[in-house]
Amino acid sequence: MNSTFASCVQRILVRLLVVGLGAFSLAPSAHAQTPLLEPNTVHWAYSAYFGTGWYKVRDERDVFVLRIAPQWAVREAGLSEDGERSIGIDARLMITTGLDSFSLDDLPGAIRADNLASLSAMPGIDVTVPVNERWTLRPHASLGWGRILGESDSAWTYWAGLKSRYTFANGDLEWALINSVTYVGYTPSDGPSANFWPLMTGLEFDYPLAGRKIAGEQLVLSWHGLYTAFGKDLDLDFITGESDLIRDQWELGFSVRKKESRFKMGWFKFERLGLAYRVSSSGNLKGISLVVKSTFDR
C-alpha cells in the first residue's frame, strides 16, 4: 500500500511541476499574436484567489490555473504554558499563471506558448497570532503585479484579510471552525479598478487512518466543507473574456497528510495532497482544485 500511494503522489506532482516549469520557461514574446482575453478584463487577483485547479464556467469554457506559493518563516508563533505569546511572521510569494486549456493526457499541448494566458506575482506577509490554545488569528496582506502574456494589458493586484481558526478534539478526531473576511482587488493599466469581499465559513476535520503509514509515518485523512459569499456579484471575465456573475461558492475537499512531516519532492514540500470540488449556487461556476495546505494556511 505504501509504495502504491507514494507512486501515485509522485506521478501527480510530476505532472503539475512539468506544467509549472514549462509555463515559467517561456518568454512573453513567444505568445500568440491574437489576444487571449478582451481588454480591461485583467482579474489576476481573482485567479490567484481561486488557486491551482480546473474550472468550468456555464459548461462552456474550461481553464486551468496554476499557483505556486513558496513561504519563508521569519518568526515562529507560539504560546507558552504561562500564557506568554509569540507572534509569528511568514513571508510568501504567490506566482500564478493561467492556461487556456489543459489535459493530463496532453501535457506538451498544455504548455505550448499560445496556450498561456496570464502571469502574475504577488509577494505578501502573514502574521499568526495565537489568542489561546484553541483560537488563532491570522492577518495577511499581499501586493503584486500581473499581465496578459503577449499583450500590453497589466494590473496591480492587492489582497488582504483576517482568518480565524478555533480547534476542537473528540478522541482521535480533531476539527476546527474556520472563518475569514478578505478584500481582493486590482487596478488595471487601462480601465477602472474592481474588487470583491469574500466572506468564508466552514469546518475542517482530521482523523488518523488506522494501520496506514508511509515511510513509517502515520497517515491522516483530512476533509473540509466551506461556504463563501462574495459580497456582490463576482464577474468571472478573467476566465472567459465575457461577463459571468456568481454570488457565492460551496467547497468540499478531501486530502491525505503525514502526521508529523511533509511530502517531499526535490525542493518542493507539501503539507498534504488532495482535491476539492467547488460549485456556485447558480451552477455557473464549477471546479476541481488541488489541496496542498489546510484551509487556514492557503
Image (cartoon, helix red, strand yellow):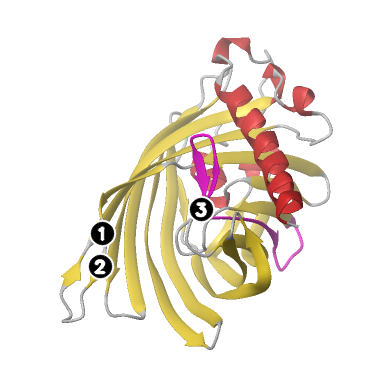
Q: In this picture, which residue range is highlighted in magenta?
A: 263-285
- SS class of the residue under badge 2? strand
Decide whether the magenta segment is chiefly helix, strand or loop: strand
Disc 2 to disc 1: CB gap under 8 Å: yes
If you read the primary sequence from the N terminus, does the residue marked by circle 1 or circle 3 appear first?
1
Q: Is residue 266 magenta?
A: yes
The amino acid beneath tag 2 is Gly
Q: Nearer the viewer, residue 286 or 255?
A: 255
**Residue 38 visible in rendering:** no
Disc 2 marks which residue?
Answer: 78
Q: Nearer the viewer, residue 233 or 197?
A: 197
Horizontal side of 167 relative to 284 (left or right) equals: left
Q: Residues within 10 Å of mark 2 (few under 14, many from 20)?
A: some
Horizontal side of 261 relative to 211 (left or right) equals: left
The percent position of residue 233, horizontal first and vertical second, equals 59, 60
As drawn, the label of residue 262 is: 3
Disc 1 marks which residue?
Answer: 88
Q: Residue at x 25, y 59 (%)?
A: 88
The amino acid beneath tag 1 is Gly
Q: Residue at x 83, y 50 (%)?
A: 59
From the image, which quarter does the N terminus lie in?
A: bottom right
Q: Nearer the viewer, residue 171 or 232?
A: 171
Q: Quadrant of residue 12?
A: top right
- Comparing labels 1 and 3, the label whose residue is closer to the camera: 3
Q: Residue at x 51, y 19 (%)?
A: 152
Identify whether 7 is placed above or below 151: below
Q: Residues within 10 Å of mark 3 (few under 14, many from 20)?
A: some
Mark 2–mark 3 distance (CA, rounded to whole Å): 20 Å
